[in-house]
Image: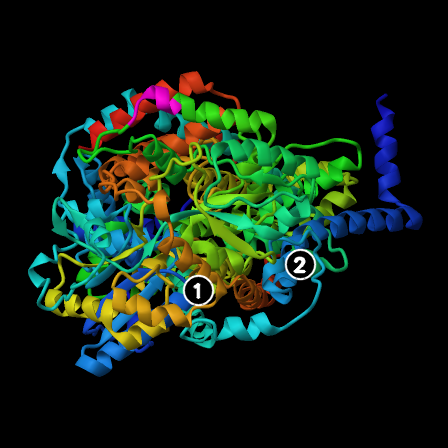
């Protein structure tokens, strides 16, 4: 018996190719776009953003194809596209990653366009600084925000405790917290969540001491003693039962719905000013916002107005100048300002701020007022964090913080350990 | 006696065909049937695999060209990376407990559902539902509704006066909640077991019944031996999948592997290294070490399989 | 001691009706209890899709305080592109994947299970190896490859590999089942002059309904549920699949429409559940066709 390939087999063999041909007629076929824009966020941000790209197209004829993703999906996709030589022209960038992308030329310096396609006259100086890496401008801040403590005002009312103001101190966590716990409302709600491994909180505390998380050279800006003191501070709160217990706190894995504020386990939570709106949508009680606690009465300087996010231009973009033109349009066009509101933070151009202010709803108004009136809480802008900052936060601060919280490590041990490990990570990265 | 021997032996003796002719007769059918797979393997799969093997010997930060690093990545892994060891421990623990439990559960339910009861379709569908949800965000939310301090499990335990911990966020128990999740999604091996049970000819049971064999004896003498190819398949696949398990830990811990790295699965760590910390070279090395480990396990399983897996051929 | 088990088997052989009934009640009781456990997540999701947004994470009760279909309308048009587009895309991708997988994998499985050729073991081992490498590290080389082929931004990276049997899981699965089909059948066919193709087409495939149905079910559901492939390869929202659309609902850093998310999650399960219900009948059909003499 011999084996022959008959016609039918042959057809079957090629059918795979034929089917792919058919699939080609599907919606996903053509590859054409004038400029591409990628950002993270939800639909409401997308609606606003697309509103502006439509305006831009009407005004200049340049079409911009937008794409948005959830935060967790955004970074692997952007990295894959960049590595694959297919990065979008305009990239929304985070403070955390801008150094990483800038140092590798994945995003382009914009200095050559400033004054030309990119008009930045009157742009807030600190926000401009925030987008610089090694002295070159890599990102245009889309809005300023600040760290803030979110306050569940209704819970405080129920507990009969006066809610904190911008003048509150670390001691208040203890004194108010004890009163709050004593009231025993809502099945043992605590006054405050555990902030011992919340990086911005540690940063704020160090800045009030005149130190910093990282130096301008990208080294650790504090020592083992401070770290031990920090962990001990929170251990005192924990032992006194004024903050959320460690196993409850560990339920917070990042997304808003997992936080202590939304799950009703605490009435105060460290967060960011631009997130009030998102939290308010998930919590039936009215929320308010105050600064992070002061070291002691009268001590300030821990806060700073941080660029909430940037637009950057891809290093591989063939239309860098046009992209810069869009960035300029995005931050300054009056109609665009009305569409964007303060969804990405407080606008950095004074004219834009003036247009936006009267249009805001209550939650946004609170955020705007808070950031505009930080007063003596406000300190200088810190240098951009080193590239390994994200790794230190995720794989050291959170892990060691939890070890201390669960009692697997003492603060005295954790301080030197943290500093040694963080130094090693920083050295390996450089 | 295999197919090709029958097919080729007769003419071979008669006309002494050339080498090429023999190759055509003996090997060609196999390769022709494998043709689509060959195109895919050489065209789409092999290239990226070799690339990742190459990258494992480089420092590659995703954004700039890879730099040759020799065996640096492998050396670091085995000498200077406590997280490698930690994530390996977590994954091993997960494999050792989740795979046997999941398989036992799937087989048990498949046997129960194979008895021709009323409402069979309904139950089978209901049991498959958790697997339909896949890695939906809803699972993460749901799991905390069940395993948090004030979750369903503790509400149940409190009926007996027991105050349970927050299982999902306590480093001593959090991995167990992921093992339970894996067992809960037992639908796929169950379906495969069911398909296997369906393939066992009914007349064998009828004959055994006539001989007076008890159900228990029928299970051991007929069902289990004839099911061994499927048991073998499920065991291999579930083990490989468990070693590579990523999504459950990712959605439940928000990608962190916390509390205290207690759910830092190997691939989750690999993912953090690759996309979180921009060390794709190191992540590739991690991946190839995992491949070697799983390959050794699989090869060992195949070697032992001839003693307990019964094929009809 | 020795006759105790004997007695049991005797009793078992002529089970009285009341005992059968009792067994049946117990079995059903167990199954119903287990079903509730399985159903709870879906009930919770269903409740979440009907209740007010700010109650989803704060309410302990599974019963909503008030009911509304609002989230469904909101969710369906919640993104700039409506979910009808996402459902269509998911259908296209999943359906082609099923066809490709069932066909290409059964071809390869037949070769591995029944044909004798040099290098078979090596190819089989290599095939299994493709299962063992975490996809995270082949992602970027694969992306580069598909980009060079001009396939990024199309469904091709999601569909073509299925027609090239790239999922070793299904090949291995089918090999195990093909090997369970009695050899005498193909040997008899061969005596009648049938070639490998006829044996594959006329004997193997018809006798393998259960495993082919299994492969179809899994392919459809897994392709439907997959979000990573679509996430990486699809850029335009008009090409998004349902799962990718769902991912877009939740952004952990800001505003998310959870009600819409859960409403659309509920709807997204409907097609795969229906597919499962329809194809699982084929699992049962196997009983008649394979109940042959050996």
Residue at the farthest front position: A298
Query: Helix, strand, or loop for circle 1?
Result: helix
Chain of the residue displaying label 2: C
Residue C294, x across and y down, in percent: 59, 50
In screen coordinates, is C190 left or right of B113?
A: left
In this rendered view, identify the residue nearer to me: A165 or B236.
Answer: A165
Identify the residue at the far top of this view: A412
- Element assignment for label 2: helix
Residue located beneath label 2 in the image: C43
> For mark 2, does the 10 Å Cα neighbourhood hold few (<14), some (14 to 19), or many (20 or more) residues?
some
Is disc 2 in contact with disc 1, using a CB cutoff of under 8 Å? Answer: no
Judging from the image, mark 1 belongs to the subunit labelled C
SS assignment for the magenta stretch, majority: helix
Res A270 visible: yes
Query: In the picture shown, does residue B31 fall above or below C274?
Result: above
Residue situated in front as seen by the camera: A288 or A340: A288
The residue where tag 1 is placed is: C98
The mark nearer the N terminus, 2 or 1, is 2
Range drawn in magenta: A222-227
C285 shown above or below A339 = above
Does label 1 lie on the same chain as label 2?
yes
């Amino acid at each position: 018996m011999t084996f022959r390939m008959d016609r039918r087999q042959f057809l079957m063999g090629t059918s795979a190719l034929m089917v792919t041909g058919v699939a080609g007629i599907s919606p996903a076929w053509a590859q054409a776009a004038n400029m591409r824009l990628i950002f993270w966020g939800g639909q409401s941000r997308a609606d606003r953003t697309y509103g502006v790209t439509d305006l831009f197209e009407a005004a200049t004829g340049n079409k911009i194809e937008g794409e948005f993703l959830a935060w967790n999906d955004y970074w692997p996709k952007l990295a894959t596209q960049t590595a694959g030589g297919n990065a979008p022209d305009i990239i929304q960038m985070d403070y955390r990653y801008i150094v990483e992308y800038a140092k590798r030329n994945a995003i382009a310096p914009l200095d050559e366009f400033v004054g030309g396609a990119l008009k930045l006259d009157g742009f807030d100086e600190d926000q401009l600084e925030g987008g610089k890496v090694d002295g070159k401008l890599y990102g245009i801040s889309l809005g300023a925000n600040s760290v803030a403590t979110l306050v569940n005002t209704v819970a405080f009312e129920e507990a009969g405790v006066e809610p904190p103001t911008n003048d509150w101190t670390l001691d208040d966590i203890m004194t108010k917290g004890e009163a709050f716990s004593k009231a025993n409302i809502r099945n043992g709600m605590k006054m405050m969540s555990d902030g011992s491994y919340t990086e911005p909180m540690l940063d704020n505390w160090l800045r009030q001491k005149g130190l910093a998380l990282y130096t301008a050279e990208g080294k650790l800006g504090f020592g083992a003693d401070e770290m031990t003191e920090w962990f001990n501070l929170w251990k005192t709160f924990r032992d006194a039962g004024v903050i959320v217990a460690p196993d409850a706190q560990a339920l917070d894995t990042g997304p808003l719905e997992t936080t202590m504020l939304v799950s009703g386990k605490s009435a105060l939570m460290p967060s960011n000013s631009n997130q009030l709106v998102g939290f308010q949508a998930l919590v039936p009680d009215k929320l308010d916002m105050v600064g992070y606690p002061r070291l002691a009465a009268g001590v300030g300087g821990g806060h700073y107005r941080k660029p909430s996010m940037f637009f950057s231009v891809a290093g591989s973009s063939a239309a860098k100048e046009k992209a810069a033109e869009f960035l300029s349009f995005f931050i300054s066009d009056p109609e665009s300002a009305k569409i964007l509101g303060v969804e990405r933070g407080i606008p950095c151009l004074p004219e834009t701020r003036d247009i936006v202010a009267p249009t805001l709803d209550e939650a946004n108004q609170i955020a705007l007022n808070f950031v505009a009136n930080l007063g003596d809480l406000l300190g200088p802008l810190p240098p951009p964090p080193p590239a390994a900052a994200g790794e230190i936060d995720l794989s050291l601060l959170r892990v060691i913080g939890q070890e201390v919280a669960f009692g697997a490590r003492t603060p005295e041990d954790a301080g030197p350990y943290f500093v040694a490990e963080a130094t090693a990570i920083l050295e390996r990265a450089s | 006696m295999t197919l090709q021997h029958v097919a080729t032996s007769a003419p071979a003796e008669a006309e002494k065909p050339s080498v090429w002719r023999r190759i055509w007769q003996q090997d060609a059918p196999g390769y022709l049937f494998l043709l689509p797979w060959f195109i895919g393997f050489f065209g789409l799969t092999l290239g990226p695999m070799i690339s990742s093997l190459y990258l494992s010997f480089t420092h590659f930060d995703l954004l700039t060209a890879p730099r040759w690093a020799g065996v640096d990545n492998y050396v670091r892994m085995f000498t200077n990376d406590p997280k490698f060891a930690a994530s390996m421990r977590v994954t091993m623990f997960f494999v050792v407990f989740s795979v046997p439990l999941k398989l036992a559960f799937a087989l048990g339910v498949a046997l129960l559902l194979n008895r021709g009861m009323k409402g069979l379709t309904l139950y089978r569908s209901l049991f498959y539902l958790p697997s339909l949800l896949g890695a939906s965000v809803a699972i993460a939310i749901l799991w905390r509704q069940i395993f948090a301090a004030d979750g369903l499990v503790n509400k149940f335990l409190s009926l007996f006066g027991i105050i349970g911990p927050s299982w999902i966020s306590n480093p001593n128990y959090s991995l167990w909640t992921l093992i339970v999740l894996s067992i809960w999604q037992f639908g796929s091996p169950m379906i495969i077991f069911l398909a296997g049970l369906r393939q066992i000819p009914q007349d064998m049971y009828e004959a055994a019944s006539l001989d007076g064999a008890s159900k228990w004896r029928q299970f051991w003498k007929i069902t289990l031996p004839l099911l061994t190819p499927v048991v073998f398949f499920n065991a291999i696949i579930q083990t490989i999948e468990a070693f590579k398990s990523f999504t459950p830990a990712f959605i439940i811990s928000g990608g962190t592997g916390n509390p205290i790295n207690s759910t830092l699965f190997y691939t989750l760590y690999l993912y953090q290294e690759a996309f979180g910390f921009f060390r794709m070279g190191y992540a590739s090395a991690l991946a190839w070490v995992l491949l070697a480990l799983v390959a050794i396990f699989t090869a060992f399983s195949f070697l032992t399989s001839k003693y307990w897996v019964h094929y009809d051929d | 001691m020795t006759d105790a088990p004997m007695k049991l088997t005797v009793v078992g052989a002529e089970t009285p009706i009341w005992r059968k009934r009792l067994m049946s009640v117990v079995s059903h009781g167990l199954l119903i209890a287990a079903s509730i456990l399985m159903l709870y997540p879906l009930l919770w999701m269903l409740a979440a899709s009907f209740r007010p947004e700010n109650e989803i994470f704060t309410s302990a009760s599974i019963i909503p305080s008030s009911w509304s279909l609002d989230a469904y309308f909101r969710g369906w048009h919640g993104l700039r592109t409506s979910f009808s587009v996402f459902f269509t895309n998911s259908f296209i991708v999943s359906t082609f994947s099923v066809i490709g997988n069932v066909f290409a994998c059964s071809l390869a499985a037949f070769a591995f299970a029944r044909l004798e050729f040099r290098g078979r073991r090596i190819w089989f081992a290599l095939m299994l190896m493709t299962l063992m490498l975490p996809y995270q590290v082949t992602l970027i080389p694969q992306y580069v490859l598909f980009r060079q082929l001009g396939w990024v931004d199309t469904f091709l990276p999601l569909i073509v590999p299925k027609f090239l049997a790239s999922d070793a899981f299904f090949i291995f699965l089918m090999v195990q089942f093909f090997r369970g089909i009695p050899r005498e059948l193909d040997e008899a066919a061969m005596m009648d002059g049938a070639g490998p193709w006829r044996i594959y087409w006329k004997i193997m495939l018809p006798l393998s309904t259960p495993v082919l149905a299994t492969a179809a079910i899994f392919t459809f559901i897994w392709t439907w549920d997959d979000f990573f492939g679509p996430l990486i390869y699809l850029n335009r929202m008009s090409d998004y699949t349902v799962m990718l659309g769902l991912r877009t609902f939740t952004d952990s850093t800001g505003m998310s429409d959870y009600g819409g998310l859960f409403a659309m999650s509920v709807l997204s399960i409907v097609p795969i559940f229906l597919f499962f219900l329809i194809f699982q009948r084929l699992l049962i059909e196997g009983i008649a066709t394979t109940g042959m003499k050996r």
